[in-house]
Image: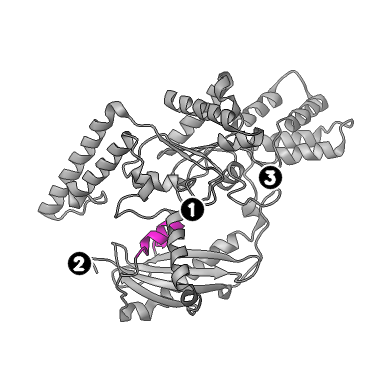
């Protein structure tokens, strides 16, 4: 925590020193802090909120912290609201939702892929993931084409006093798993463990180079066997379009192929809704197949995360195409699953109730109190504005302040309502407008652009 505080203080000083004005200074001090564990994210957030109260060197971050995890349970704002409030420009936040609310965003790897945060200039990895490629994916959020910054800064906090002990521990585990796999055919639960020292040696080498502040891992985008970052996928696409753009654009919709790769069997789909309209959206899905090439029906049988879908079909121009009769005959059974899953995703967003911001019970109680005790000498538009702000997600710090105001015994009735209105408006918080609901569609509106079957390598394939 001391290292994190010092890094934030250094970033704040650098922003003040280099900025041309207050707006530029706010952009230069934006920091994205990553941790693997949601509990750590919560702990770091709570510690910093307290620490900021007595530290002038990091006071710029006061009231401008958000924290997110995969469960959306770390803050009063949703993940989407936190990201938009942190990087409204690079996230292209719509009018009315583009307030620049946060300078410090603490997150698990839920934000390591699929979001554009190049408005941010700094990343701090609070802990070191076992797989260094995870760091590359995290850093791909800000090290992107379109960044307003000439340089971005990537920091990692290492457990220097225990690093050798931790790395040696994992090596011993991998050695034992490799021995078990070789002797009795046990399926090893750690990726790469059946290969023994080869995979881990590469991983350890990368971690130790990072400790020496060697940036080559980021410069080349990971190891030869690693997945690409989102920006690298875009570069691959740009090159393909530059050389074969006319041919690619002329491909018929619903075209498909297949290949032998990896360890997962299934079919990837690219689909679109609202083609050539203002509502156009593209969807990627990977439907997992069982051993008989039928769509699996269990939970987790449909992969929705964009980065995972792209990694599953990652290939080169030299990859041999593969198609079997069973895949060709059954591909539309898989498409039916993907199409329905995409439709369900869209339908969820047609219900305004699913798009409402999450408001804490305390805010609802205070809003009801103000409505019941509305002071006659306060203009209606001021009361309405306060209620709109109140019935929006609030940061934890402001919620604590609100509880103190509301539960104070110094004021009661209309006098308390008047005080609450003044202080609510004085927070500077803005009301959150829910995203407009999507219009109803039918299943036929989910159109198939293309597909790719994947057959596993090795004995299973």
Mark yes or no: residue 47 visible.
no
Start-end of magenta stretch: 298-315
> Which of the two labelled residues, at mark 2 and mark 3, occupies the earlier sequence position?
3
- Asked whether disc 1 touches disc 3, contact meaning CB atoms under 8 Å apart, the reply is no
For image coordinates 20% across by 40% down, the residue present is 171
- Provide the secondary structure element on which disc 3 rests: loop
- Provide the secondary structure element on which disc 2 rests: loop
- Provide the secondary structure element on which disc 1 rests: loop
For image coordinates 12% across by 53% down, the residue present is 182
For image coordinates 58% across by 73% down, the residue present is 445
Distance in Å between CA atoms under marks 1 and 3 = 23 Å
How far across and down, in percent of the image, does residue 244 sit? 45, 73
Distance in Å between CA atoms under marks 1 and 2 = 33 Å
- 223 sits left or right of 274 in the view: left
Q: Sort mark 3 into few (<14), some (14-19) or many (20+) by Cα contacts within 10 Å.
A: many
- 121 sits left or right of 364 in the view: left
Q: Sort mark 2 into few (<14), some (14-19) or many (20+) by Cα contacts within 10 Å.
A: few
> Which of the two labelled residues, at mark 1 and mark 2, occupies the earlier sequence position?
1
How far across and down, in percent of the image, does residue 241 sit? 47, 69
For image coordinates 46% across by 51% down, the residue present is 113
Question: Circle 2 sits on which residue?
Answer: 459
Question: Circle 1 sits on which residue?
Answer: 114
How far across and down, in percent of the image, does residue 194 sit? 19, 52
Question: Circle 3 sits on which residue?
Answer: 432
Q: Quadrant of the N terminus?
A: top left
| In the depicted structure, whether residue 193 falls above or below residue 76 | below
Closer to the camera in the image, 365 or 308: 308
């Amino acid at each position: 925590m001391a290292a994190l505080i010092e890094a934030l203080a250094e970033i704040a000083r650098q922003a003040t020193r280099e900025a041309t004005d207050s707006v530029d200074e706010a952009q230069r001090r934006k920091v994205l802090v990553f941790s693997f564990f949601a509990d750590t994210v919560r702990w770091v957030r709570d510690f910093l909120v307290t620490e900021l109260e007595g530290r002038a060197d990091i006071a710029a971050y006061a009231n401008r912290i958000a924290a997110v995890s995969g469960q959306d349970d770390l803050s009063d704002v949703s993940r989407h609201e936190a990201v938009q409030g942190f990087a409204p420009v690079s996230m292209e936040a719509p009018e009315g939702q583009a307030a620049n609310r946060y300078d410090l965003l603490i997150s698990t790897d839920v934000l390591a892929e699929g979001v554009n945060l190049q408005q941010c200039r700094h990343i701090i990895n609070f802990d070191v993931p076992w797989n260094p490629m995870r760091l590359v994916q995290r850093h791909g959020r800000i090290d992107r084409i379109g960044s307003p910054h000439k340089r971005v800064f990537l920091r990692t906090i290492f457990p220097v006093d225990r690093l050798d002990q931790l790395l040696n521990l994992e090596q011993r585990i991998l050695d034992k798993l490799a021995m078990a796999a070789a002797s009795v055919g046990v399926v090893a639960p750690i990726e790469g463990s059946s290969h023994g020292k080869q995979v881990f040696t590469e991983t350890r080498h990368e971690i130790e180079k990072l400790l020496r502040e060697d940036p080559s891992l980021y410069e080349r985008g990971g190891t030869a066997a690693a997945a690409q970052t989102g920006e690298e996928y875009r570069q691959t696409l740009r090159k393909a379009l530059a050389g074969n753009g006319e041919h690619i654009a002329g491909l018929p919709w619903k075209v498909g192929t297949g290949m032998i790769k990896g360890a997962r069997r299934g079919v990837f789909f690219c689909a679109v809704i609202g083609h050539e309209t203002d509502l156009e959206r593209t969807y990627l899905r990977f439907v997992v197949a069982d051993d008989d090439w039928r769509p699996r029906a269990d939970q987790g049988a449909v992969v929705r995360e964009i980065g995972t879908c792209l990694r599953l079909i990652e290939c080169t121009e030299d990859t041999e195409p593969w198609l079997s009769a069973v895949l060709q005959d059954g591909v539309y059974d898989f498409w039916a699953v993907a199409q329905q899953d995409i439709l369900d995703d869209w339908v969820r967003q047609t219900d305004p109730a699913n798009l409402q911001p999450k408001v804490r019970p305390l805010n609802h109680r205070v809003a009801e109190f103000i409505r019941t005790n509305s002071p006659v000498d306060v203009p209606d538009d001021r009361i309405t504005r306060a209620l709109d702000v109140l019935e929006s997600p609030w940061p934890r710090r402001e919620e604590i302040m609100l509880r103190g105001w509301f539960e104070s015994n110094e004021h009661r009735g209309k006098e308390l309502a008047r005080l609450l209105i003044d202080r609510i408006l004085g927070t500077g918080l803005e009301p959150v407008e829910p995203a407009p609901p999507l219009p109803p569609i039918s299943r036929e509106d989910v159109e198939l652009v293309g597909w790719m079957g994947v057959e596993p390598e090795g004995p299973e394939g």
